Image (cartoon, rainbow, N blue to C red):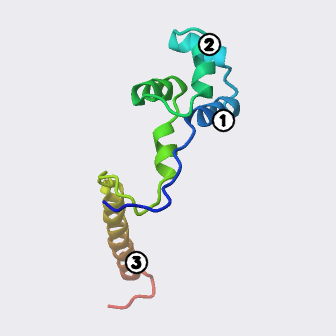
């Protein structure tokens, strides 16, 4: 762990929430009803600079928006997350590209063999 002389300021979660509500055109009243809380609760959320992870988790599920990804994107790319990248799609893509190349070669060979000007 290294000590940083000028640490990054933490994001203001309330502003981030307000921005998402505005872009998605979701009123705080609708959010409150969906969450089953008083209409004053989302107003307080929008004013607070931080909140419990469990609260942000609940809001993320209600709004179907990944606030955690937004927060993580604010950190420098060299910060480790411990998350192992899912490379199964990349590996499958490589396999399919190799298979396509093999099938293309076979097709070209068959076309060459079936050409009418081919002599025995």
82 vs 22: above or below: below
x and y percent of residue 34 in the render? 55, 13
Pointer 2 residue? 40
x and y percent of residue 3 in the render? 37, 61
x and y percent of residue 65 in the render? 52, 33
Depth check, mark 2 against mark 3: the one in front is: 2
Examine the image and state in which quarter residue 14 appears.
top right
Pointer 3 residue? 108
9 vs 116: above or below: above
Question: Considering depth in this image, is 55 or 60 the residue closer to the camera?
Answer: 55
Question: Considering depth in this image, is 66 or 100 the residue closer to the camera?
Answer: 66
37 vs 28: above or below: above
Image quarter of the C terminus: bottom left
Pointer 1 residue? 19
Q: Is residue 60 left or right of residue 32?
A: left
Question: Which of the two labelled residues, at mark 3 and mark 1, occupies the earlier sequence position?
Answer: 1
Total number of numbered discs in the rendering: 3
Depth check, mark 3 against mark 1: the one in front is: 1
29 vs 113: above or below: above
The residue shown at (65%, 19%) is 28
The residue shown at (34%, 62%) is 2
Image quarter of the N terminus: bottom left
């Amino acid at each position: 762990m290294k000590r940083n002389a000028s640490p990054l300021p933490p994001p203001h979660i309330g502003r981030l929430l307000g921005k998402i509500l505005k872009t998605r055109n979701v009123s705080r009243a609708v959010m409150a009803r969906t969450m089953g809380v008083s209409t004053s609760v989302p107003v307080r959320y929008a004013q607070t600079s931080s909140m419990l992870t469990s609260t942000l988790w609940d809001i993320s599920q209600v709004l179907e928006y990944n606030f955690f990804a937004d927060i993580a994107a604010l950190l420098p790319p060299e910060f480790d997350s411990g998350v192992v990248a899912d490379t199964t799609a990349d590996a499958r893509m490589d396999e399919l590209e190799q298979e396509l190349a093999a099938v293309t070669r076979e097709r070209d060979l068959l076309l060459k063999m079936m050409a009418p000007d081919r002599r025995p």
